[in-house]
Amino acid sequence: MIDSLEVVRHPRARVARLSVDPATGRVRLTVPKRMALRTAIEWATTKSDWIDAQRAVLPTGRPFLPDVVLPVADRAVTLVWDETASRVPRLLPADDATASLLCGGPHEGFEARIGRWLVREALRVLTDDTAYYAEKAGVGITRVAVGDPKARWGSCSSSGAIRYSWRLLLAPGFVRRATVAHEVAHRVHMHHGPSFHALVADLYEGDPDAARAWLRRDGAALHWYGRASSSE
């Protein structure tokens, strides 16, 4: 049996097809509507060597452990554990490029405390970025929230609520800001037509195409922070 196998029936599929999600390591088996599921799974089990090869080139897991260095909003942040320190992580800036994140309490639970701090920091940074671009665009935002979706980096509802992946905090700043400009532009154009892209280019101070290219090329690696391996 294949670990983490997800079976999806697709009405337009003509043959069974396997793929490995680079963000999760999960194996997806796409099955034509009329194919027997047992036949498709039996075929998939013969592809274990191919699956192993695909998983071998996945990004490396990057758990939140002491002495690990994380890229947090364009700053190299070293995780520091001191059992006598506060359990609430505290950022200790060294300079504009580096900092330490000090977290105390029992070693058990260190990773979870770091993870919660990162989510809170992501919400703070992304809220500030959103306010900046919303003012520039002359639009209102009803709510900013963060989550951990695997398939998208941001979304904007017609009500004015914007939701981001907290993992944008770990991306280069130009990628994070371009993503925010993209979602804020949806407050004016709820589509991806020429007028939308023109507004994104007007709002954003750089090249939004470069940010999209980075996410296509390297975005999957962001999902491996906080994980030890492809089996988690």
Image (cartoon, grey):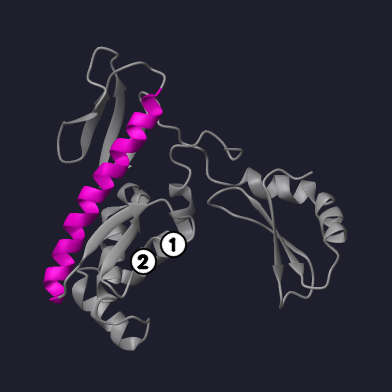
Quadrant the C terminus occupies: top right
Q: Residue at x 82, y 61 (%)?
A: 37
**Magenta span:** 109-138
Residue, disc 1: 152
Which element is circle 1 on? loop
The foreground one among 227 and 12 is: 12
Tell me if I can see residue 89 in this picture.
Answer: yes
Task: Give the residue type that dot 2 points to.
Answer: Ser
Which element is circle 2 on? strand
Q: Is residue 5 left or right of residue 68?
A: right
Verify CB contact (< 8 Å) between mark 1 and mark 2: yes
Q: Give how far across and how far down residue 119 sits, in percent.
A: 31, 43
The foreground one among 197 and 131 is: 131
Compared with 159, 216 (above or below) is above
Q: Is residue 128 left or right of residue 209?
A: left
Q: Which numbered disc covers residue 162? A: none
Task: Give the residue type that dot 1 points to.
Answer: Arg
Residue, disc 2: 155
| Crowd around label 2: few <14 · some 14–19 · many ≥20 (10 Å) | some
Q: Residue at x 29, y 64 (%)?
A: 162
Extreme residue toward the top, this view = 84
Q: In the figure, residue 90 lies in which quadrant?
A: top left
